[in-house]
């Protein structure tokens, strides 16, 4: 996992990169995308169900490929 990703943050997707924060802090439950300049940018608040999916992905070591899957199907704001 990238060194920039903090404890409690989970890489959930590549191509493009998506990282979810589930650390219990200020950004808990938010999905971030990796900007082309390298920084993480918040893009949507995850639902409780989506947070549970992130926890399952973390526990099982699963990272989705964005060319085939997306982390969120909610009607909220979209990442990129």
Image (cartoon, rainbow, N blue to C red):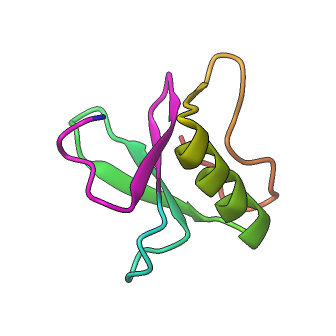
Q: Residue at x 50, y 22 (%)?
A: 15
Residue 31 located left or right of residue 42: right
Image coordinates of residue 12 in percent, x first then y, are: 53, 40
Image coordinates of residue 63 in percent, x first then y, are: 55, 31
Asked if residue 40 is among those painted magenta in the image, a careful observer would answer no
Query: Which is nearer the eye, 60 or 22?
Result: 60
- Residue 44, located in which quarter of the rendered image? bottom right
Region in magenta: 2-20
Q: Is residue 76 above or below residue 69?
A: below
Furthest-left residue in this view: 3
Query: Which is nearer the eye, 13 or 16?
Result: 13
Q: Residue at x 48, y 67 (%)?
A: 22
Residue 73 located left or right of residue 44: right
Q: Residue at x 19, y 46 (%)?
A: 4
Q: Looking at the figure, which quarter contains the N terminus?
A: top left
Asked if residue 17 is among those painted magenta in the image, a careful observer would answer yes
Q: Residue at x 29, y 60 (%)?
A: 7
Q: How many marks?
A: 0
Image coordinates of residue 17 in percent, x first then y, are: 44, 33
Query: Which is nearer the eye, 13 or 58?
Result: 58
- Residue 60, located in which quarter of the rendered image? top right
Image coordinates of residue 27 in percent, x first then y, are: 42, 74
């Amino acid at each position: 996992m990238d060194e920039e990703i903090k404890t409690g943050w989970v890489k959930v997707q590549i191509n493009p990169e998506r990282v979810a924060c589930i650390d219990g802090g200020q950004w808990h439950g938010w999905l971030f995308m990796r900007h082309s300049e390298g920084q993480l940018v918040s893009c949507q608040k995850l639902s409780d169900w989506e947070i549970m999916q992130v926890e399952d992905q973390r526990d099982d070591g699963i990272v989705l490929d964005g060319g085939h899957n997306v982390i969120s199907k909610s009607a909220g704001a979209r990442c990129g």
